Image: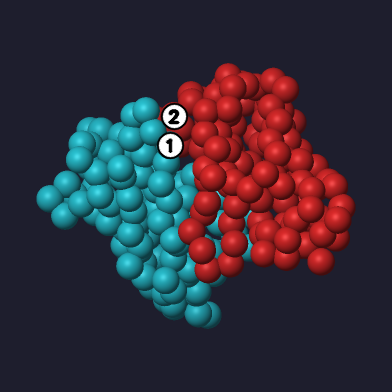
Amino acid sequence: ETGVTQTPRHLVMGMTNKKSLKCEQHLGHNAMYWYKQSAKKPLELMFVYNFKEQTENNSVPSRFSPECPNSSHLFLHLHTLQPEDSALYLCASSQDGTGANYGYTFGSGTRLTVV
Amino acid sequence: AQSVTQPDIHITVSEGASLELRCNYSYGATPYLFWYVQSPGQGLQLLLKYFSGDTLVQGIKGFEAEFKRSQSSFNLRKPSVHWSDAAEYFCAVGARGNDMRFGAGTRLTVKP
């Protein structure tokens, strides 16, 4: 399998639930990213991992907790979410940690609905 | 820091007509410029990118874009639009040592 794979594709969770989003890349890239895409808003960068080390946390609430066990896998752990957290969560990877040099490869996203 | 502006939120064109989507960037040095396309419910797919050299770059699906330094623009064009081109298009700017910044997107509707 190639590219960036995100699971699940759709997730509905209550505000008291705990769930995790998974992202896996088979491109040999060294950097991985979480983005949030809400309706009628620009893409919001959430977290950046470069060689498994978190290099950016873009003022994301603590109810979102990322984990990057290796350069190929990235998780987003969710707990006590709010309805306004409903969005499409996109994972991306890039060859180097800046991302700007080569562009990103995106996954298909997880559509999250918080009820 | 770099930034991107896509002036058009929504554009409608007829199938077979030409298309131009506008993108203006702000950055002090020569930027890396990208166009991505997103179909409904999908992630973003890279259409083309500009790093240096020839200012007219060719991408996938018959798209091209032209870098104009004097106008700080990187507009996306296609000579003849197909119904399958209906999607959201994002311009992005990157800089060495920094992450990319995305525009707010332009939604393209194609009329039959």
Q: Secondary structure at mark 2?
A: loop
In-front residue for pair B47/B83: B47
Q: Secondary structure at mark 1?
A: loop
**Disc 2, disc 1: CB below 8 Å?**
yes
Estimate the x, y position of residue B41 in percent, counting from the top left.
Answer: 67, 60
Chain B colour? cyan
Q: Chain of mark 2?
A: A
A29 vs A11, left or right, is left
How many angstroms separate mark 2 from mark 1 (CA)? 5 Å
In-front residue for pair A92/A55: A55
User: Extreme left residue here?
Assistant: B70
The chain that appears red in the image is: A
User: What's the residue at 78%, 62% (across, down)?
Assistant: A114
Kind of residue indicated by mark 2: Thr
**The image quarter in which residue A52 lies:** top right
Q: Chain of mark 1?
A: B
**Residue labelled with disc 2:** A98
Q: Badge 2: how crowded within 10 Å, few (<14), some, or many (20+)?
A: many
Q: Is residue A93 visible?
A: no
**Residue labelled with disc 1:** B99
Q: Badge 1: how crowded within 10 Å, few (<14), some, or many (20+)?
A: many
User: What's the residue at 87%, 52% (across, down)?
Assistant: A17
Kind of residue indicated by mark 1: Asp
Q: Quadrant of the N terminus of chain A?
A: top right
How many numbered tags mark residues here? 2
User: What's the residue at 44%, 74% (across, down)?
Assistant: B10
Q: Quadrant of the C terminus of chain A?
A: bottom right
Estimate the x, y position of residue A41 in percent, counting from the top left.
Answer: 51, 63
**Colour scheme of this structure image?**
by chain
